[in-house]
Amino acid sequence: QVQLVESGGGLVQAGDSLRLSCATSGRTFSSYPVGWFRQAPGKEREFVAGIRWSSGDTAVGDSVKGRFTISRDNAKKTVYLQMNSLKPEDTGVYYCAATSRMVLASTPRIYDYWGQGTQVTVSS
């Protein structure tokens, strides 16, 4: 059984920081690349960042580059998204997802498994 569980969302003010966690489980799951996506009301799901377990290679979306960092703890099977200098436009539901295609992709349809999401709200 493959599962992803996000946590760490909340209500913060502009300029604050938050760290999201994505706990993963599943026998072969630890080899699947993991991505963070977000979705604001009325908007399409947007790629935020992604990481490969084995190499630690990362990719970060242009809209968050320089402010957000993705990392992983192999022992805990957890992927983190450190979000600094938050802006109101960062508001949305944040999802983590994993893909069995073994590619670090920014396209949501590539990802097979999704968590339930965690809400991040940034007030101005």
Image (cartoon, rainbow, N blue to C red):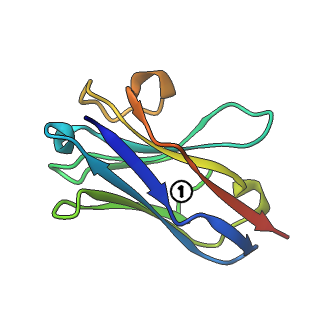
For label 1, the SS is: loop
- Please give the name of the residue rendered at 62% of the width and 34% of the height, measured from the top-left corner: 45
**Amino acid type of disc 1?**
Lys
Figure quadrant of residue 44: top right
In the rendered image, residue 26, in percent from the top left (x then y), is placed at 21, 41
Q: Looking at the rendering, which quadrant does residue 73 occupy?
A: bottom left
Q: Is residue 62 visible?
A: no
Does residue 19 appear to the left or right of 74 in the view shown?
right
Does 73 appear above or below 101?
below
Q: Residue at x 25, y 47 (%)?
A: 25
Nearest to the observer: residue 65 or residue 10: 10
Q: Nearer the viewer, residue 14 or 99?
A: 99
Q: Position of residue 78 (x, y in %)?
A: 30, 59
Q: Quadrant of the N terminus?
A: top left
Q: Is residue 113 left or right of residue 16?
A: left
> Which of the two residues, 53 or 28, is positioned nearer the viewer here?
28
Q: Quick check: can you spot residue 6?
A: yes
Q: Position of residue 19 (x, y in %)?
A: 50, 69
Q: Residue at x 21, y 49 (%)?
A: 53
Q: Please indicate whether residue 3 sits to the left or right of residue 16 in the image.
A: left
**Residue appearing at x 72%, y 73% in the figure:** 12
The residue that disc 1 covers is 65
